[in-house]
Amino acid sequence: MKYREAWQKAAGLLQDNGLEEARLESEILLRHTLGISRVQLHLELERELKPEKETVYFETLQHRLEGEPSAYITGEKEFYGRTFLVDKRVLIPRPETEHLIEKALQIARHYECPYIADIGTGSGVIAITLALELKDAYVYATDISEDALEVARQNAEEYRLEKRLSFYQGDLLSSLPEMVDILAANLPYVPKAEAGLLNGEPRLALDGGKDGLDLYRRLIPILPARLRPGGTALLEIGIHQSELLAKYIKDTLPQASLEIISDYAGIPRIVALTLPI
Ligand code: GLN
C-alpha cells in the first residue's frame, strides 16, 4: 500500500466514524507514524508503506477512534504557528484562543514594555506566544496545577525567555508577584455536566461549575488587586456565556468597559474588560 492509499483509507475510516477533520487528522497521524514532515509526506505520496508501519498506523487510528485526541497521540499541537508539547496533564490548545492572542498583541502596542499575566496557563501557549511576539514584554504565568506547569516549563525551555517569562504555582491571582497591564485567562469554562465527556483532557482544565462561569466569578472581583488602572483582562468563554458574564461584570465592576470578540464561527469567545484609569 502506498502512503497515499493508506492516508485515503484512514481518512475514510475516520470520516465514517463521524470525525470532522478526518483528512487532516489522518495526515497528522501518518506523519507521526513515519516521523516525517508535511512537505516530505507530500513529496513521497507514491512511496510504499512498509507492512510494519501500516500495522502501527492502523493501530494508532484505532486509538483515535476510541476517543483519544490526535494531539495526545502525537504529543504535540500547533498554536499560533508554533508547535507545543502536550499530554494528558494539560488541555489541548484550541485555535479559538488565537483570537485572545490577537487582541492582546493589539493592546500591547500601547505599552513600551507591557507587563502581562496568563492565569491558568496550562501548556503555556498563551504566555509563551505573547513573550515571543512581544520582545519587550514581561510575562507571568500561573496555574494551580503543578503538573501543568511542568509541561509549560518544558515548552518554554526551547526559547530563551528566562528573563522575561516566569511561572508560578497558585490559585488564580494568589501567586502573581506584581500588578500587570494585560491579563489573559482561558480558565475552565465548560459546564460541569459536559466536562466529563471530553476526550480524556483534565477535568481541572475544563470544569467551570454548573454554568461554566464559577472561576470567572471568583476572578473578576479580585482583578483590580492585580490589574493596573486602565489595564485590560481578556477572558475566553464558551457558547451562550457572553451575556451572563457581561451582566456579572457590570454588577461587580460597574466602571469597567467591555468589548466582546467573536471567533470565526461567530461565537462570542473573548470578553475584553478594561478597568477605568
Ligand atoms: N474550548 C474548550 C472546549 O470547548 C474549553 C476550554 C476551557 O474550558 N477553557 O472544549
Image (cartoon, rainbow, N blue to C red):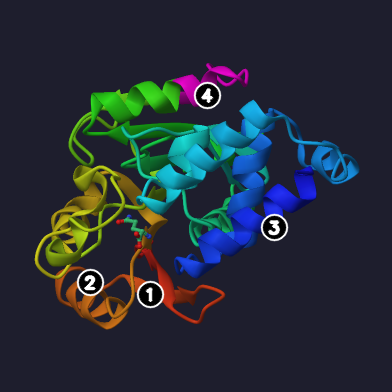
Residue type indicated by callout 2: Ile
Labels 3 and 1: the sequence-earlier one: 3
Specify the label residue 120 is tagged with.
none
Nearer the camera: disc 4 or disc 3: 3
- Residue span colored magenta: 154-165
The residue at which mark 2 appears reads as 249
In this rendered view, identify the residue nearer to me: 59 or 261.
59
Dot 1 falls on a residue whose secondary structure is: strand
CA distance separating discs 3 and 1:
47 Å
Dot 4 falls on a residue whose secondary structure is: helix
The residue at which mark 3 appears reads as 8
Disc 4 residue lies near ligand 1 with CB under 8 A: no
Residue at x 35%, y 50% (from the top left corner): 66
In this rendered view, identify the residue nearer to me: 250 or 29.
29
Q: Are marks 2 and 1 in contact (CB under 8 Å)?
A: yes
CA distance separating discs 1 and 4:
32 Å
The residue at which mark 1 appears reads as 258
Residue type indicated by callout 1: Leu
Residue type indicated by callout 4: Ala
Seen in the picture, residue 144 relative to 147 is either above or below; the reply is: below
Position in image of residue 103 (x %, y %): 55, 61
